């Protein structure tokens, strides 16, 4: 009496759409049983792979099945699939695994493509696999084309959205509901906080770097969307993602290798912005300035008044300090010119004392005038007021959410106490846990938002601006000559020396931070 053939079923769908039609897992299983029963084959195992592509072998159930087939002796004699494309859509990989299985006495059999073991059948199978591979690549191409067009029209393609956003139903097109993104008011505040820390700091420091922001978030109990701790990469991704200024970039990388695609392949999708463009660009400038590839540590910590903030307008390179007459005279000169002569750059060379005086005089007599300061800061102060109002609304929404969750919990506890329901009900326990989590998270978020308002510092008035201007004008000059470096750098972050003019640039956010600190 011959032993019955032991069969393992491999059942796979690559998309949820396939799971709803004739390639569904139950239908594949039904057809496989119908194939085995009349032949007297015994089904000893089945391996189910929902939502997995057959273009590679990175499939958990597939690998578990291959391990069982490669055992000595194998756990089954045949692997049964609906079609060879369920097993692999790559001709080379299909043949590789067919031969590997055959070495251990295991055959691959297709329900819908019955073939023998002779050379002709092997050739037919290889031709079928080539067509499957071609069709798979064509389908992927058409699918990507459709997804890119979907993104161009402002619709979301189904991945997890960036923190600060949530997916909502957009418009209905036939039987399909198009998805779009809207701002998640709870998580969006975390995004705004990260950008604020990068530009202004936490009220006790200046602008913060990525590492410092990460430490601050974790120390403050501010969690990621899934409740975890922040990492440096995650914070850097938030700070550099154009999604937050309303331009989400789709199709930026190859999904297998994660290598960047050419810019011609990238599609920009319009989404509601969380951060203003000017704020985003200012953060990018800060990140670039902090990068070791752009700024050496000695430049930002040198003792000279304008070291690290003075640049040649002609070539964009830093102005460095040079000395003459045995150190009696000191000059700021273009570093390109200093290395290569006028062939490299025809930039200016300016006596240090003269340039320092020009910059300090401009700040002292032009910028540090109450009317000028008020005009310069008006837009920043308006944004500060808007942010405070938005935070207040956000806090009210969070407090309301916490109160609603608390009220629902009270009604559930009343129902349990009055014998209307039983606490042993697992669904009830899960609901209580869920409501507690919503209430506690909303309270924690509200307290954090209130802390952010407190850290903004006192309200800026005309009187505080006048007082700041008067105090700063007195403190910038040092008795006996020279200027206080820290005061000057709080008001000017970049000085450009051109052939006929001097351009002094500063950050409004840094100026506001200095003003707030002086008013506290």
Image (spheres, rainbow, N blue to C red):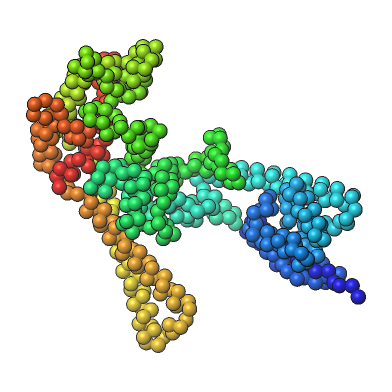
When the figure is inspected, residue 155 is found, relative to residue 314, above or below; the finding is: below
Judge from the rendering whether residue 270 lies leftward or rightward of residue 78; answer left or right.
left
Residue at the (35%, 70%) spot, across then down: 405
Q: Position of residue 200 (x, y in %)?
A: 27, 43
> Within the image, what quadrant is residue 469 found in?
top left
Q: Quadrant of the N terminus?
A: bottom right
Residue 351 visible in the snapshot: no
- Pick the front one: 508 or 96: 96
- Pick the front one: 80 or 404: 80
Residue at the (89%, 50%) spot, across then down: 119
The residue furthest top is 342
Judge from the rendering whether residue 165 lies leftward or rightward of residue 98; answer left or right.
left
Residue at the (42%, 70%) spot, across then down: 434
The residue furthest bottom is 419
Residue at the (31%, 46%) spot, across then down: 197
- Pick the front one: 218 or 241: 218
Residue 430 visible in the snapshot: yes
Q: Position of residue 287 (x, y in %)?
A: 37, 38
When the figure is inspected, residue 424 is found, relative to residue 435, above or below; the finding is: below
Count of marks, rendered view: 0
> Within the image, what quadrant is residue 416 found in?
bottom left
Q: Position of residue 489 (x, y in %)?
A: 22, 33
Judge from the rendering whether residue 317 lies leftward or rightward of residue 38; answer left or right.
left
The residue furthest front is 326
Q: Position of residue 464 (x, y in %)?
A: 12, 42
């Amino acid at each position: 009496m011959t032993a019955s053939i032991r069969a393992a079923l491999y059942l796979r769908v690559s998309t949820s759409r396939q799971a709803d039609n004739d390639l569904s897992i139950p239908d594949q299983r039904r057809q496989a049983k119908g194939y085995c029963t009349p032949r007297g084959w015994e089904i000893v195992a089945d391996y189910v792979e929902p939502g997995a592509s057959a273009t590679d072998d990175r499939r958990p159930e597939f690998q578990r099945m291959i391990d069982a087939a490669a055992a000595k002796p194998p756990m089954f004699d045949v692997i049964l699939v609906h079609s060879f494309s369920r097993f692999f859509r790559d001709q080379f990989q299909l043949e590789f695994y067919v031969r590997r299985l055959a070495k251990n006495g295991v055959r691959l059999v297709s329900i819908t493509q019955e073939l023998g073991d002779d050379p002709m059948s092997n050739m037919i199978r290889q031709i079928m696999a080539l067509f499957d591979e071609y069709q798979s690549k064509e389908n992927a191409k058409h699918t990507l084309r459709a997804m890119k067009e979907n993104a161009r029209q402002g619709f979301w393609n189904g991945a997890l959205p960036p923190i600060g956003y949530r997916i909502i139903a957009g418009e209905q097109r036939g039987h399909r509901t198009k998805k779009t993104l809207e701002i998640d008011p709870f998580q969006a505040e975390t995004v705004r906080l990260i950008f604020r820390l990068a530009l202004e700091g936490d009220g006790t420091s200046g602008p913060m770097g990525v590492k410092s922001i990460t430490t601050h978030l974790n120390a403050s109990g501010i969690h990621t969307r899934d409740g975890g701790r922040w990492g440096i990469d995650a914070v850097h991704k938030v700070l550099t993602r154009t999604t937050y200024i309303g331009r989400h970039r789709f199709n930026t990388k190859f999904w297998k290798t994660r290598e960047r695609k050419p810019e011609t392949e990238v599609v920009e999708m319009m989404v509601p912005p969380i951060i203003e463009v000017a704020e985003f660009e200012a953060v990018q400038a800060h990140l670039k300035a902090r990068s070791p590839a752009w700024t050496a540590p000695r430049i930002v910590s040198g003792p000279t008044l304008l070291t690290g903030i003075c640049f040649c307008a002609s070539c964009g390179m830093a102005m460095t300090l040079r000395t003459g007459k045995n150190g009696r005279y000191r000059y700021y000169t273009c570093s390109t010119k200093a290395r290569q002569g006028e062939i490299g750059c025809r930039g200016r060379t300016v006596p240090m004392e003269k340039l320092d005086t020009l910059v300090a005089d401009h700040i002292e007599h032009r910028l540090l005038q109450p009317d000028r300061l008020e005009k310069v800061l008006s837009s920043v102060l308006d944004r500060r007021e808007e942010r405070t109002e938005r935070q207040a609304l956000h806090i009210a929404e969070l407090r309301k959410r916490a109160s609603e969750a608390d009220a629902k919990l009270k009604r559930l506890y009343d129902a349990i106490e009055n014998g209307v329901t039983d606490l042993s009900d697992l669904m009830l326990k899960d609901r209580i846990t869920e409501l507690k989590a919503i209430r506690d998270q909303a309270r924690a978020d509200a307290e954090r938002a209130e802390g952010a308002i407190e850290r903004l510092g006192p309200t800026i008035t005309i009187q505080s601006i006048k007082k700041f201007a008067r105090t700063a004008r007195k403190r910038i000059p040092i008795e006996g000559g020279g200027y206080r470096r820290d005061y000057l750098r709080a008001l000017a972050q970049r000085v450009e020396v051109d052939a006929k003019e001097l351009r002094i640039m500063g950050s409004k956010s840094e100026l506001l931070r200095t003003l707030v600190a002086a008013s506290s």
